[in-house]
Image (tube, rainbow, N blue to C red):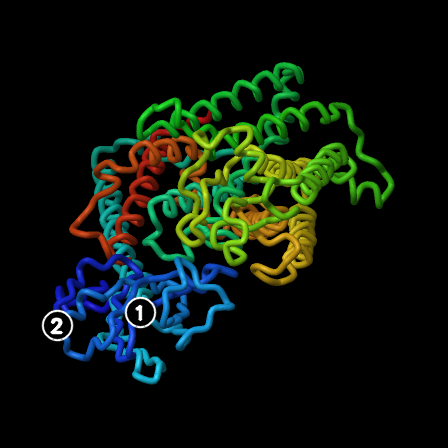
Amino acid sequence: MSEFTEYVEPTWRGLDMRKLKVDEAYLIPKSLYNTVTYLYTLSEECYTCPYTKVKAVPQHLANGDANYVDVTTTLNVAHPLKFKIFDNDVGRYAFSNESALCEFEQRNLKEFGVYNLTVNVDGTCRLEIDKDGVNVNYSLLSVFVLVSLVLTVLKIGLCAWRSYRYEDEILDNTPPSPTTQPTSRNRMRSLDVFRGMAIVLMIFVNSGGGDYWWIEHAPWNGLHLADVVFPSFLWIMGVCIPISVKSQLSRGTTKMQICLRIIWRSIKLFSIGLCLNSINGPNLESLRIMGVLQRFGIAYLICGIVHTLLTQTDRIEPQVTWKRALYDIITFKGELVVALILVIVHLSIVFGLNVPNCPKGYLGPGGQHSNAAYPDCIGGATGYIDLQILGNSHIYKHPTAKYIYDSKPFDPEGIFGCLLTIVQVLFGVLTGVIILIHTDWRARITRWLLWSMFLTILTAILSEFSKESGIIPINKNLWSLSFVCVTTALAFTLLSLLYYIIDVRHWWTGYPFEACGMNAIIMYVGHTVMHKMLPWHWRIGAMNTHFLLLLEAVWNTLLWIGIALYLDHKEFYYSL
């Protein structure tokens, strides 16, 4: 069972194995060379970066020397590593023009392993396994099995309790409690389920997701599991805008009143997000201005007002076949023009603005990127504009790129990125328009999948089927055009699937995610405020294994799902 929970011996040849964190291993360098050598490493995750100096290795450190612990170093082995050994100190970074004694790449280093790196007398190198590491994927399986067993027991217990209560009611000739009767809701369940899945996944990744690299946000370019959550949430918000506007107009609410409500709701979203940013202390001199809810508020404000003003209350469906087939596009043409203008403005600024000490059109993370040629250029025009508007004291200090590229502060939810965020929400508005205009499920799904296909092709063109080499790489931090396209395509596809399974075929009720979607704002604010509190979070020992961190994240997520189910049982729903 130890291999499934990442258990290791407390010590190994004098090394404290419990001091290692997740995805870390020990490296014992041993030099038989005739002078001091210098160890440099490079992670595969750091694109176009120079090698970084780890430490100096004293000469003639023979096998069995008691001082080997003094030169032992820890390595992060989540990604493949490259090694270089130099016979002189070339500085903090080693560039490609530096001549090394030896260099090699190692792709199969494991967590909690111990590895011997030997520099031979002739300058050659060899890496050997001293203690094999653990397979971190076993923790996924073990937590899944454990949670499945617990949920199965709870389900059996709940069924037994309901059966017991039902027998008591029959014996007492008492009619069933009205709270046990299912409540029928005249709405698309798949929309609530989609929103519920998004908020559940958001809570899971915000809880750490077990510290698996592919669950966390990508350091810069690329698409990890955490990166699809926020855009999906924004997109589904857009889907609900035209449905809400039509409902209000049908009740006689004026467009002015609707716009005022949109403004008020946007202010509340922005204000709540600002308050959440002060959760570690309300220091106004260093308070982060932007954030998740702030971007929600801005996008909702623009998209809601634009759609409300452009909505025609007296439209008549055309009788011509081709016009009727494209009626959703014709109806949405104003919003599409707004989206196109925003894309043009965004791209013109990104590739046309002269940023001091940065190449025009730079989209990298700065720091070590491009061999540390532009250390202060994180995000290019995007980072520069946010820095000028918000100031260095009011932007996010710990971007994901900081820990890989040694980058400067950068706000992934900054102001400039709102331009394409609005475009993404407008795609959601288009989805809602399709729902209102086309009542046949085949027409809806066909259009959603066609949009998904179109955006997927556009993503492939912009990114050139690569992570780093495209014209516009997929990048959540920059909220790039290719990122908007690929995440919107995923949203179109997922909603099509959920709609067919839940609303068309009724194969699944959406349990338990529908209840989560009905109270998404309570779950988001609640899990943010109570992030460090019992019983949602806990610590046992060093918490240095994927198993414990994953178990804690799953526990926290399940607890909030339980809260959502309880609120749904009480028929308590809250929205701003």
Q: Nearer the viewer, mark 1 or mark 2?
A: 2
Distance of mark 1 from mark 2, alpha carbons? Answer: 25 Å
* Image location (x, y in percent) of residue 210: 32, 54
Within-10-Å neighbours for mark 2: few <14, some 14–19, many 20+: few
Q: Is residue 305 above or below residue 36?
A: above
**Residue name at image x 40 percent, y 27 percent:** 287
Can you say which quadrant of the picture contains the N terminus? bottom left
**Residue name at image x 48 percent, y 60 percent:** 49
Kindly identify which residue carries mark 2: 66
Please, which residue is most extreme toward the bottom here? 122
Q: Viewer-proximal residue, 165 or 481? A: 481
* Image location (x, y in percent) of residue 157: 22, 49
Q: Viewer-proximal residue, 86 or 415? A: 86
**Which secondary structure lies at badge 1?**
loop
Q: Which mark is residue 110?
A: 1
**427 left or right of 131 in image:** right
* Image location (x, y in percent) of residue 478: 56, 44
**Residue name at image x 37 percent, y 64 percent:** 89
Badge count = 2
